[in-house]
């Protein structure tokens, strides 16, 4: 298994005439097809159908007698939105268009009736809308967008998400007004946290995370993504002509001891010995980030769902190992009273403020971008193709040589 050590000098410019930083990367603007994506919180889907957009495709999601269905949003008759329609016949698994009552099977997408033309009106076999595989898992509605048979959802997500009997957790979600690639790049262990988040509520009283680290990326054994390892970071440094970072005016109030956040997982840690988790942070296909602790008892899973070229849906789970009712109660209180707003809202808002204002263009990559570059290479080489299995393995994750 290859190990990639990244250089410390600037790597390269994209050199693209159209100034698209993703030109030639193989990362599609609308995301990778043939994967499951979380599209909404399950509790938000009540008796009325809901419209969602995933990978640029307009989809209506609805329930009938507790069963989930997902169809293409546009009625082929006159283009009305099926999400404005209703399940007029409970138990039939159908939805009727709000315009002329064309009624479609949620299971197959076939038109089974044209209500305004009478029961004798024929519904030709070719009249249908696309039907999407849809599931509910860990409080989210998931839709499979692709051209191949949908794999089992539980096989596509980390065990901490699917093993509900062993794990409990909480979720938040937000819409970001930027392309999904910008959002995912931000989650690729790109070392922005010691700078952007150093004065967030949960970190401002602690020493600044080590920065100026060197990063390595390793393909995961199950071929689902890459894991990151960083080393040789420093908590402060002197910059000639400027002074120290963090600046002195930001150090006097950092009186707390480090909590261990950001600590790399070692071979002797319980996360490895008992649970086989080797990396503190991993990038997973098709656009997820998995972050854990050396104890192996807490993980964060962040899933980026492309909406269209200009926005994405960000779903984040905080997951705790079940260790008795008392600890579960404390973890719930901890999340409600602290994590939900200090991290899931305010911490994430510091990223949101920057990412939504990014100006796409030529990029000068440097040492902090090693994890991002490794992800781009891996994702492009391992993405599922149309009507195929996985693509050929990547030859290497190494970025271009320094110029």
Image (cartoon, grey):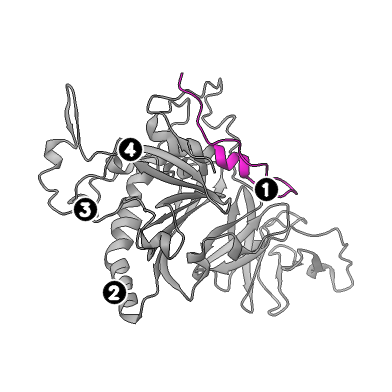
Classify 10 Å Cα crowding around label 4: few (below 14), some (14-19), many (20 and above): some
Q: Position of residue 360 (x, y in %)?
A: 47, 31
What element does badge 2 sit on?
helix
Mark 4 lies on residue:
213
Instruction: Decide which of tag 1 and tag 3 comes sooner along the chain.
Output: 3
Task: Give the left or right position of residue 21, taking residue 246 as reference.
Answer: right
Residue under the point 38% across and 46% down: 352
Residue range highlighted in magenta = 377-403
Task: Give the left or right position of residue 76, taking residue 165 as reference.
Answer: right
Which secondary structure class fits the magenta region best? loop
Q: Report the front residue among 82 and 67.
A: 67
Residues at circles 4 and 2 in contact by the CB criterion of under 8 Å? no
Mark 1 lies on residue:
390
One can see residue 342 in this view: yes
Instruction: Decide which of tag 4 and tag 1 comes sooner along the chain.
Output: 4
Mark 2 lies on residue:
330
Of the two numbered discs 3 and 2 in the rendering, the one whose residue sits closer to the viewer: 3
Classify 10 Å Cα crowding around label 1: few (below 14), some (14-19), many (20 and above): some
Residue 205 is one of the magenta-drawn residues: no
Q: Is 171 rendered above or below residue 282?
A: below
Residue 399 is one of the magenta-drawn residues: yes
Mark 3 lies on residue:
258
Instruction: Decide which of tag 4 and tag 2 comes sooner along the chain.
Output: 4
Q: Position of residue 199 (x, y in %)?
A: 22, 46
Disc 2 versus disc 1: distance between alpha carbons?
42 Å
Instruction: Decide which of tag 3 and tag 4 comes sooner along the chain.
Output: 4
């Amino acid at each position: 298994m290859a190990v990639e050590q990244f250089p410390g000098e600037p790597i390269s410019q994209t050199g693209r005439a159209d100034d698209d930083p993703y030109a030639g990367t193989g990362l599609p603007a609308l995301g990778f097809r043939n994967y499951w994506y979380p599209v909404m919180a399950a509790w938000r889907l009540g008796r009325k159908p809901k419209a969602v957009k995933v990978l640029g495709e307009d989809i209506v999601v609805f329930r009938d007698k507790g069963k989930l269905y997902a169809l293409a949003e546009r009625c082929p008759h006159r283009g009305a939105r099926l999400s404005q329609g209703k399940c007029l016949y409970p138990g039939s698994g159908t939805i009727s268009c709000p315009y002329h009552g064309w009624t479609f099977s949620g299971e197959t997408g076939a038109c089974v009736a044209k209500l305004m033309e009478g029961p004798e009106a024929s519904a030709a076999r070719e009249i249908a809308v696309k039907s999407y595989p849809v599931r509910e898992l860990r409080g989210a509605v998931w839709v499979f967008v692709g051209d191949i048979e949908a794999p089992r959802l539980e096989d596509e997500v980390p065990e901490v998400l699917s093993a509900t009997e062993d794990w409990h957790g909480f979720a938040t979600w937000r819409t970001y007004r930027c392309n999904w690639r910008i959002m995912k790049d931000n989650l690729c262990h790109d070392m922005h946290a010691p700078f952007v988040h150093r004065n967030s509520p949960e970190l401002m009283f602690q020493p600044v995370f080590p920065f100026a680290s060197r990063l390595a990326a390793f393909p995961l054994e199950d071929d689902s993504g890459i894991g990151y390892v960083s080393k040789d970071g420093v908590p402060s440094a002197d910059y000639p002509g400027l002074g120290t970072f963090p600046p002195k005016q930001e150090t006097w109030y950092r009186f707390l001891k480090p909590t261990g956040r950001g600590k790399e997982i070692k071979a002797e840690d319980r996360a490895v010995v008992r649970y086989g988790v080797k990396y503190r942070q991993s990038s997973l296909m098709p656009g997820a980030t998995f972050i854990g602790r050396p104890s192996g008892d807490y993980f964060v899973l962040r899933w980026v769902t492309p909406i269209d070229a200009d926005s994405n849906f960000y779903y984040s789970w905080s997951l705790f190992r079940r260790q008795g009712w008392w600890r579960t109660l404390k973890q719930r209180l901890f999340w409600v009273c602290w994590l939900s707003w200090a991290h899931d809202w305010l911490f994430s808002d510091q990223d949101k403020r920057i990412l939504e204002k990014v100006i796409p263009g030529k990029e000068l990559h440097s040492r902090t971008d090693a994890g991002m570059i490794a992800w781009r290479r891996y994702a492009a080489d391992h993405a599922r193709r149309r009507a195929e299995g996985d693509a050929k393995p990547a030859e290497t994750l190494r970025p271009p040589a320094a110029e």
